[in-house]
Image (tube, rainbow, N blue to C red):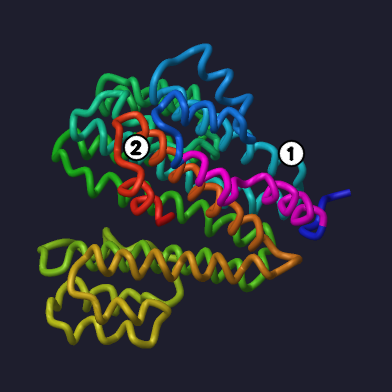
Amino acid sequence: MPKDFGYINARIRGMKSKLLGPEFYDSALDATDFPAFLSVLSSSSYMRDIEESQSRFEGLKIVDDALGRNFYKTARSMLNFSDGNPGELILALLMRYDLNNIKAIARAKHAGRDESEIMDKLLPAGQLKPAVLETLASAGDMGAVAQALTMTKTPLRKAFNKAYAQYASDNDLYAMELELDREHYRAISQTLKTAKPTAKFKRFMQLEIDATNLRTALSTRGQDVNSDELFVRGGREIKKAMFDDIVNDTSDAALQSLTATSFADVAETTDFNSAESVIRSVLEDTTSRLRFEGMDIGLVASYLRTKESEVAKLRLLARGKFYGVPKDTLAKELGHA
């Protein structure tokens, strides 16, 4: 019998109880150096992952490997106790990690960074296993990444190869990322047609497409671009006409059309970083509200976001202790001051 979200969310609540609390962060901040931090982390729910990584790696790679493996196992466990339409929707949520990981690797290869500068940016949870991501990260160049991806099952492999063919001639990383975005959301839209999501979850996914389009419009304002090639279809609030207005009109007036959308506060920002902060806040608030839907996927989405935040904090702590960052400074960066 297919598992419904009542059962799935009960399992997710059990997983939430294992997230690290304030006491852990107090102890981690008090750690005198990196080995002491590792000792604290080894006493947490990450114990087995740290032990396994210590047998293979040294230094910061221990933490990056352990966190990546733990996150991947967490995602796999969700799929193991779900099936049917709920399972399809959870898989759709996890697809974004493949997208983000592939884009992070592409950016690193474009910038000429090596594997050691990539792994801390990756968060395995989709169809690309940690070992596969290591292979992609260690690839010699973008062409080698494209070749390695053809051996995987991610729906993005064909889009990456198509985008790489163009990248090889124009070196346009941004165009490559947009092609990946379009393919990702095409796959999401197809899932939404077949997996019978609730209206609120469908709206959440549409909001992510809106956010992608708004970021693109803001980052290309005033540039001579083909907006038809940049716009990702499937959103709800950021219409094509609004997208075109923001791209082509650099005055404040063009942003006023946003006041009738969920991203109204973007109209009051003065730079892209501020706008990005607003966009991220809108998505986080929407995810947070979804967690109260007991018979919906909202709790899964909220848990994943919280788990992501935990991993980000642990990576920050690990680097702070490894490089001797003062406790007070690290606490402020952690938002724990």
Q: Amino acid at mark 1?
A: Asn
Is 280 a magenta residue? no
Quarter of the figure that contains the C terminus: bottom left
Report which residue position mark 2 lands on.
Answer: 320
Of the numbered discs 1 and 2, the one sitting upstream in the chain is 1
Q: Quadrant of residue 109?
A: top left
**In this rendering, which labeled residue sits more in front, label 1 or label 2?**
2
Report which residue position mark 1 lands on.
Answer: 80
Give the main secondary structure of the magenta stretch: helix
Q: Is residue 58 above or below residue 100?
A: above
State yes or no: discs 1 and 2 in contact (Cβ < 8 Å): no
Q: Is residue 175 above or below residue 196?
A: above
Q: Position of residue 284 (x, y in %)?
A: 48, 65
Magenta stretch, residue numbers:
7-28
Residue under the point 43% across and 71% down: 282
Residue under the point 45% across and 39% down: 30
Q: Amino acid at mark 2?
A: Gly
The front one of 67 and 146 is 67
